[in-house]
Image (cartoon, rainbow, N blue to C red):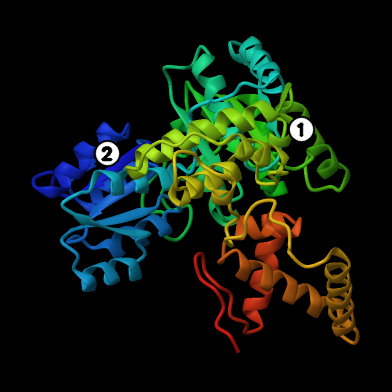
């Protein structure tokens, strides 16, 4: 985690900096907003910015947006001044961090940005076989494609390969191709020259140059636009990139690791992914099996998360009851390790007694995993058939476009505005979802932002 602190280091923000460093963050400092923008343009890079709330948060956020730098900003201020917190969020800050700093709160903010744990925990032979292959090829310079369902730990495996490689002491830079809008991704990857577009007031170094000498992870590469795929192919072949607005190529020395939760061979057949790029990326394929395909890992990870979240929440560690383990092994885990982690976190908080009992294993809506309805089976089936019939009849007389629109918006509502989750549930690409939402917004419909739901009516 690379953290940029903007503001004076004296007082409480300095204490917050120390806590962040103790939690593993690599910290750099800029006294002013202009210095911060200059540092980010110059290739220092940051995954997160902590900015003193007394500075102009809006100026920083607008500067980042104008120069196409996709780095979240957290405002930091002494006390819980509601007005300043609201103003900071309205100005574009993702969070407001009250000072004096609480160590656990800072850890939570850092973890939310990192969005995953880099620790590899496994016992199953299926995972062991994947890691044996990873160990075998880690020391090479070959490009690697890591595939697997969402939540299986593809970025964790990519970092593992980097640590085992000859580039381990160099940078590991990750870019989520699905999370960054298309119009920003090119500049994020390749950088830009001064005057390349409105807002480009100085040269900006992109992720390729930040990763020079190290490893560049292109996460969810299937979501990359076809035009950018062509530029990426050239960068891999020629080991050089062109900044946006640049007049001469820039040499780079990096190893590429890409991930995808989609079948890229199928994407090639449908014309959404370049076949020549797939060949370049897929020198070696590491396929991560779904969690349901490695049952021993369900047990190992569950115990690991139970200890982790007991410690994090200051509650006694409770082992899993035998019946709980059997219940976990029977669940399909469509969300894989990420879903299991959230489930065990909930169980740690809900458990009572000396062990984590099956009653503590609940879905996000509070339903017990594996819980069976008390109603007779034939009654349940009749109710389901009746509901399905009513739902189907309600579709008659409506256009396909109208049904599709309502399905997309209701799914986005269910995901609280999270585009990536909604796209996965709908089985479409994030690019297709964004295009649909733009179309609906242009027609005057309200589209929920991340963390929001649509207003009823």
Nearest-to-viewer mark from 2 and 1 = 2
User: First in sequence: mark 2 or mark 1?
Assistant: 2
With respect to residue 152, does 196 lie above or below? Answer: below
Front in this rendered view, residue 251 or 288: 288
Front in this rendered view, residue 298 or 217: 298
Residue pointed to by mark 2: 20
Q: Quadrant of the C terminus?
A: bottom right
Across and down, in percent, residue 99 comes to 18, 54
> In this rendering, does residue 243 appear at all?
no
Q: Are marks 2 and 1 in contact (CB under 8 Å)?
A: no
Residue displayed at 23% across by 63% down: 56
With respect to residue 314, does 168 lie above or below? Answer: above
Q: Quadrant of the N terminus?
A: top left
> In this rendering, does residue 3 appear at all?
yes
Residue 278 numbered tag: 1
Across and down, in percent, residue 283 comes to 73, 21
Across and down, in percent, residue 356 comes to 51, 41
Across and down, in percent, residue 175 comes to 53, 40
Around disc 2, counting alpha carbons within 10 Å, would you say few (fewer than 14), some (14 to 19), or many (20 or more)?
many
**In this rendering, position of residue 217 left or right of residue 66:** right
Residue displayed at 15% across by 43% down: 14
**In this rendering, position of residue 453 left or right of residue 412:** left
- Real-space Cα separation, disc 2 to disc 1, in angstroms: 39 Å
């Amino acid at each position: 985690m690379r953290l940029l602190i903007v503001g004076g280091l004296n007082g409480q923000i300095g204490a917050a900096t120390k806590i962040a460093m103790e939690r593993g963050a690599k910290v750099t400092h800029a006294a002013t907003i202009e210095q911060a923008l200059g540092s980010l343009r110059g290739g220092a890079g940051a995954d997160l910015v902590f900015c003193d709330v007394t500075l102009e948060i809006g100026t920083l956020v607008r500067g980042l947006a104008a120069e196409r730098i996709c780095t979240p900003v957290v405002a930091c201020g002494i006390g819980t001044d509601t007005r300043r917190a609201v103003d900071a969020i309205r100005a574009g800050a993702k969070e407001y961090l009250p000072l004096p700093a609480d160590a656990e709160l800072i850890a939570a903010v850092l973890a939310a940005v990192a969005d995953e744990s880099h620790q590899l925990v496994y016992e199953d032979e299926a995972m062991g076989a994947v890691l044996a292959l990873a160990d075998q090829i880690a020391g090479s310079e070959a490009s690697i494609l890591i595939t697997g369902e969402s939540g299986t730990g593809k970025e964790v495996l990519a970092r593992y390969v980097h640590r085992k490689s000859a580039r381990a002491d160099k940078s590991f830079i990750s870019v989520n191709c699905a999370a960054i809008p298309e119009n920003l991704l090119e500049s994020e990857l390749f950088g830009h020259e001064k005057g390349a577009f409105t807002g480009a007031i100085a040269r900006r170094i992109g992720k390729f140059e930040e990763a020079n000498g190290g490893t560049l992870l292109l996460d969810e590469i299937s979501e990359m636009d076809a035009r950018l795929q062509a530029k990426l192919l050239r960068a891999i072949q020629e080991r050089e990139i062109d900044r946006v607005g640049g007049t001469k190529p820039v040499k780079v020395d990096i190893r590429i690791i890409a991930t995808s939760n989609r079948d890229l061979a199928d994407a090639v057949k449908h014309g959404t992914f370049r076949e020549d790029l797939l060949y370049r990326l897929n020198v070696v394929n590491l396929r991560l099996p779904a969690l349901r395909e490695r049952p021993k890992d369900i047990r190992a990870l569950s115990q690991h998360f139970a200890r982790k979240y007991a410690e994090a929440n200051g509650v006694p560690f409770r082992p899993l009851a035998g019946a709980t383990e059997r219940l976990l092994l029977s669940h399909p885990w469509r969300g894989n390790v990420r879903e299991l982690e959230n489930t065990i976190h909930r169980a740690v908080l809900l458990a009572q007694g000396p062990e984590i009992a099956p009653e503590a294993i609940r879905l996000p809506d509070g339903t017990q995993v594996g819980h069976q309805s008390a109603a007779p089976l034939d009654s349940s089936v009749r109710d389901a058939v009746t509901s399905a019939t009513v739902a189907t009849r309600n579709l008659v007389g409506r256009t396909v476009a109208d049904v599709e629109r309502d399905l997309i918006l209701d799914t986005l509502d269910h995901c609280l505005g999270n585009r990536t989750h909604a796209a996965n549930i709908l089985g479409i690409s994030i690019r297709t979802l964004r295009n649909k939402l733009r179309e609906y917004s242009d027609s005057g419909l309200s589209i929920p932002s991340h963390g929001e739901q649509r207003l009823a009516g």
